[in-house]
Amino acid sequence: MNSLTEALSGDVIICCGSGGVGKTTVAAVIGLELARRGQRVVVVTIDPAKRLADALGVTAAPGTKGGLGNEPTRLVLPGTPTTGELWAAMLDPAATFDGLVRQTAPSPERAERILANPFYRNIAGALSGTQEYMAAERLYALHSDPRFDVVVVDTPPSRHALDFLEAPSTLARFLDHPVFKLLMVPARRGLSVLNVAAQPVLRSIGKVVGGAVLADAIAFFQAFDGMEAGFRDRAGAVMALLRSETSRYVLVASPQSDTVDEARFFADRLHQASLRVSALIVNRSTPTFPKPAVPRRKADAALWANLDELESMATAEHEHLAALAGQVDDAPVAWVPLLSDDVHDLDGLELVRALLFGSGVAG
Ligand SMILES: Nc1ncnc2c1ncn2[C@@H]1O[C@H](COP(=O)(O)OP(=O)(O)OP(=O)(O)O)[C@@H](O)[C@H]1O
Ligand SMILES: [Mg+2]
């Protein structure tokens, strides 16, 4: 077991880092490694590059809007047979939000009333941080799913990716918002939508947002009445899982100086949240080659110049990385070189896996 494998021995693995550094690739590669070690793993990807999505079997059927992705699909693993399993799913925030409503609603009828409400359909997609929170919610749901031992989760390509760490307080703030309260109170008194809309304050709001929007909003809050506690509890449970002893954070970075700065931002965010980075993966690094022990001949000057340039680039990258590596304490740092082709199929993932974890199949 190398130190990276040891660092990843948790039941939840969260891959974070800035845009395009290789979070989705690394999440899939970690999934592959753990499956080869005999675990039943599900990898939740977020907007994977088209070809990787195809390779993972999470591409939505033509004409559907990503609806298929939320359900995990089992993959056939390359190489030696193992008792482990690799499953992949693509995060569908809207379907996840719907699942949360179904789970929290006191009855299926109430859930359907909410799900069909146009106001709900609008906020489900637009609430700030929804994608981040839904990634965490999905993680929680799959973690409780008896089919899987480990959940590996990718994060969205934004600086807000770690906002899910504050999801419960964001949700609580939303539930405590004066407008929310304003709409809930008349709902609780059992007034009809028309009567509620006729209240002076709401009449003014209705003039601004439009009567139909207001009516939808009121109908939504009436249907939602009594479910806040369920939402809060669930958010608390998700939060506890993110902070649990067995959750691991993998920071993915690339060695260029601007992306190293981004990675330092993520390391800082985790630190502020009192979470530690379990492993740092430096992806797309400049490959280095041992210098041949032969005299430099003039005829080979161009080749030598190439080799020297690669070496000085690699040295510069290690210097850029030093401060970041210092920021992640004793977490192992693993390097993956820039490959000649992108990683778009299981063979490509297997290649990166072997580079990261060694080629042998661990028992
Ligand atoms: N070591 C590598 N060598 C060559 N190509 C790579 C390597 N790692 C990843 N790639 C390619 O780089 C692209 C970006 O990788 P990936 O989609 O994993 O990044 P990401 O961090 O998830 O991006 P986003 O922030 O957009 O979600 C992909 O096309 C992937 O195949
Ligand atoms: Mg990605």
Image (cartoon, rainbow, N blue to C red):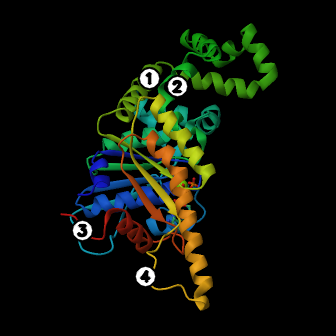
Identified at 52% across, 63% down, the residue is 285
Q: Are marks 2 and 1 in contact (CB under 8 Å)?
A: yes
Q: Secondary structure at mark 3?
A: loop
Q: Earlier in the sequence, mark 4 or mark 2?
A: 2
Q: Are marks 4 and 2 in contact (CB under 8 Å)?
A: no
Q: Are marks 1 and 4 in contact (CB under 8 Å)?
A: no
Mark 1–mark 3 distance (CA, rounded to whole Å):
43 Å
263 vs 124, nearest the viewer: 263
Residue 142, position as x, y percentages in the image: 35, 45
**Circle nearer the viewer, 4 or 3:** 4
Tell whether 292 sits left or right of 150: right
Q: Amino acid at mark 3?
A: Val
Residue 178, position as x, y percentages in the image: 63, 13
Say which mark, if any, is on residue 287.
Answer: none
Mark 4–mark 2 distance (CA, rounded to whole Å):
63 Å
Q: Earlier in the sequence, mark 2 or mark 3?
A: 2
Camera sees residue 68 = no
Q: Secondary structure at mark 1?
A: helix
Say which mark, if any, is on residue 293.
Answer: 4
40 vs 15, nearest the viewer: 15
Q: Residues within 10 Å of mark 2 (few under 14, many from 20)?
A: some
Identified at 29% across, 53% down, the residue is 3
The residue to which callout 2 is attached is: 171
The residue to which callout 3 is attached is: 361
Q: Quadrant of ligand 2?
A: bottom right
Q: Is residue 298 above or below residue 321?
A: below
Q: Earlier in the sequence, mark 2 or mark 1?
A: 2
Q: Amino acid at mark 2?
A: Leu
Mark 2–mark 1 distance (CA, rounded to whole Å):
7 Å
Q: Are marks 1 and 3 in contact (CB under 8 Å)?
A: no
